[in-house]
Image (cartoon, coloured by chain):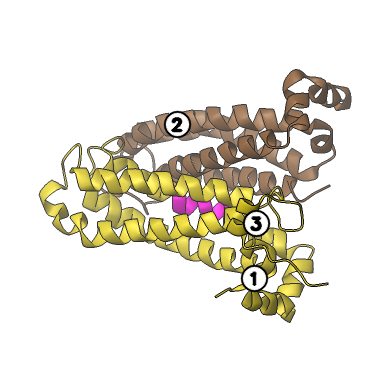
Amino acid sequence: MSLLPFCEWLASTKGSIALHESLYIYPLVESVHVLTLCVFVGTSLMLDLRLLGVALRRVPVSEVTGRLVPWMVAGFVVMFISGILLFYAIPIRSYQNIFFRLKVIALLLAGANAWVFHNGVQRTVARWDRDLIPPKKARFAGAASLALWAVIIVCGRMIAYNWFDCDMPQPPLIKWAAGCVDRQR
Amino acid sequence: MLLPYFQWFETTTIGTAIKNSSWAFAVIESVHLLALAVIGGAVLMLDLRLLGLGLRRQPIPEVAREAQPWLVGSLIVMLITGFALFSSEATKCYYSTPFWVKMTSLALAMAFTFTVRRRVSFEGDGRVRPIVLRLVALVSLTLWFGVGAGGRWIGFSG
């Protein structure tokens, strides 16, 4: 099953066209997306570094999460909404972009990592709250989050480049990965 | 007046190498963005603390000490990558209003961060009035916001 027809329909809607052709709204949404990156990734970075036992070692983990998570959530919500709008403005090209696809996969993995951390080792945080170096599972969650968000940021930035776009000659592997389809003439 | 210098930057080895490569700009830009996330975290952590919204139970000097190496480290990465990006399109930057907004904000932000903000946060809560702490945080956030927004907007102009 391909989501291409859905993306084609999305691209034909009035809102998508308006956003795509707007002089200021699209750049504005893009700016909001990048600036909330500071709020969300910046604050999760601090939590990840605490989980790795690298920064804020004297602050109990529960206090770092208690204080920073509201900012992470707020940052994520704005980042997510602005990201959806950016996709909505350019659905087909984004869908057929290998960096966009990689980014979505990394996002899902980051979500899974956060879920596992939250429902796993974080439940026993009382036992290791003040450890200078948290247990292995917590360190793994921190490291995985750092790596995945780095991938997400790099892929997100690379979406802007057209090296692997379907409208250019591409090797079969790229065509497959990007989901390019040969148009009937 | 500065234009000849800007044009000269584009003729340097770094400038031409980046301009002639199809991927160098993208890679450097990505590193620039990664460092942006780090600097955002380092600035926000201390400013939120100064505003009384962050790690409230930790003394301000300690939060400042923790944030300092990340701030300095990411700033160095940002300056190096930013300079490389700049040298590949210096002439475009010269004619870009967002570029000048960004550079002005950056100069002010760095000057403010390493003088007033540094001094105030290492002094701590007891000796500085809360209203001053909040003001310092707001000025810092505004200046760094100017840097980020200006930077993003360079890409949209020209």
The answer to whether dots 3 and 1 both sit on one chain is: yes
Q: Colour of chain A?
A: yellow
What's the amino acid at mark 2? Arg
The residue wearing badge 1 is A88
| SS for callout 3 | helix
A71 on left or right of A92: left
Q: Which residue is rendered at x = 68% and y = 80% of the image? A: A9
Q: Which residue is rendered at x = 35% and y = 47% of the image? A: A144
What's the amino acid at mark 3? Lys
Q: Is residue A39 magenta?
A: yes
Residue farthest to the left, as pictured: A127
* Residue B79, image x, y percentages: 60, 29
The residue wearing badge 2 is B118
| Label of residue B2 in the image | none
Say which of marks 3 and 1 sits in front: 3
* Residue A88, image x, y percentages: 64, 70
Q: Between B104 and A102, which is closer to the camera in this rendering?
A: A102
Q: Which residue is rendered at x = 22% and y = 53% of the image? A: A62
Q: Where, by quadrant of the figure, is residue A57 drawn?
A: top left
Q: CA distance from mark 3 to mark 1?
A: 23 Å
Q: Colour of chain B?
A: brown
Which class describes the residues within 10 Å of circle 2: few (<14), some (14-19), or many (20+)? some
* Residue A101, image x, y percentages: 55, 58
Give yes or no for contact between labels 1 and 2 (Cβ–Cβ under 8 Å): no
Q: CA distance from mark 1 to mark 2?
A: 43 Å
Q: Main secondary structure of the magenta part?
A: helix
- Nearer-N-terminus badge (3/1): 1
| SS for callout 1 | helix
